[in-house]
Amino acid sequence: MASKGIPLPLHDTLRDLALLRASSVDLSGLIADDTTSSQTSKEAEGVEESTIESYAFVREVRAALRMHNSGEAQKQATRIEKVQVELIDVLRSLSD
């Protein structure tokens, strides 16, 4: 509860208020309200979700690079090409 001491001098209070107004300080921005905290928590959730997605992306890229560097992708491509050639031969033999 506020103490019932000597009130602030009016002259000093008016001067302080004038300084605040001249410096364009938004006092409402200094007071935390419920909408600000909920908005901040939503932003934090968005950042956290984005971070999780970023880590998942990095995992996938690393796996792809590992596969590429091991030559596994080239082996699979060669195998697919062989299967395609065999299927084309089968289609040709069926159409003849």
Image: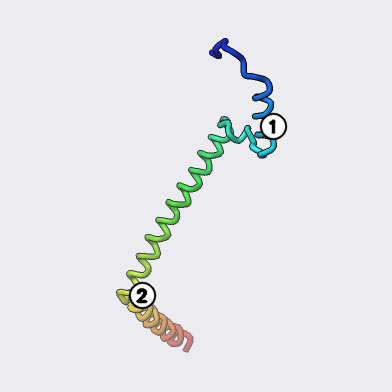
Q: Position of residue 36 (x, y in %)?
A: 57, 35
How crowded is the residue under tag 2: few (<14 C-alpha within 10 Å), some, or many (20+)? some
Could you say which quadrant of the image residue 4 lies in? top right
Between 46 and 90, the one lying in front of the other is 46
Earlier in the chain: of badge 1 and badge 2, it is 1
* Residue 9 on image: x %, y %: 64, 19
Q: Name the residue at 68% across, 23% down.
A: 11
Badge nearest the viewer, 1 or 2: 1
Q: In this view, does 79 lie to the left or right of 42?
A: left
Q: On screen, 61 above or below 23?
A: below
Question: Compared with residue 75, is residue 51 higher up or lower down, i.e. above or below?
Answer: above
* Residue 3 placement (x, y as % from top left): 54, 12
Q: On residue 73, which mark appears?
A: 2
Q: Given the image, on which type of amino acid does mark 1 rest? A: Ala
Check disc 1 and report the residue beneath it. 18
Residue type at tag 2 = Ala
Q: Distance between the residues labelled 1 and 2?
A: 71 Å
Dot 2 falls on a residue whose secondary structure is helix
Question: What is the x, y in percent for residue 82?
Answer: 37, 82
Q: Around disc 1, counting alpha carbons within 10 Å, would you say few (fewer than 14), some (14 to 19), or many (20 or more)?
A: few
Q: Between residues 44 and 30, which one lies in front from this camera angle?
A: 30
Above or below, 60 against 40 in this view is below
Camera-side residue of 16 and 77: 16
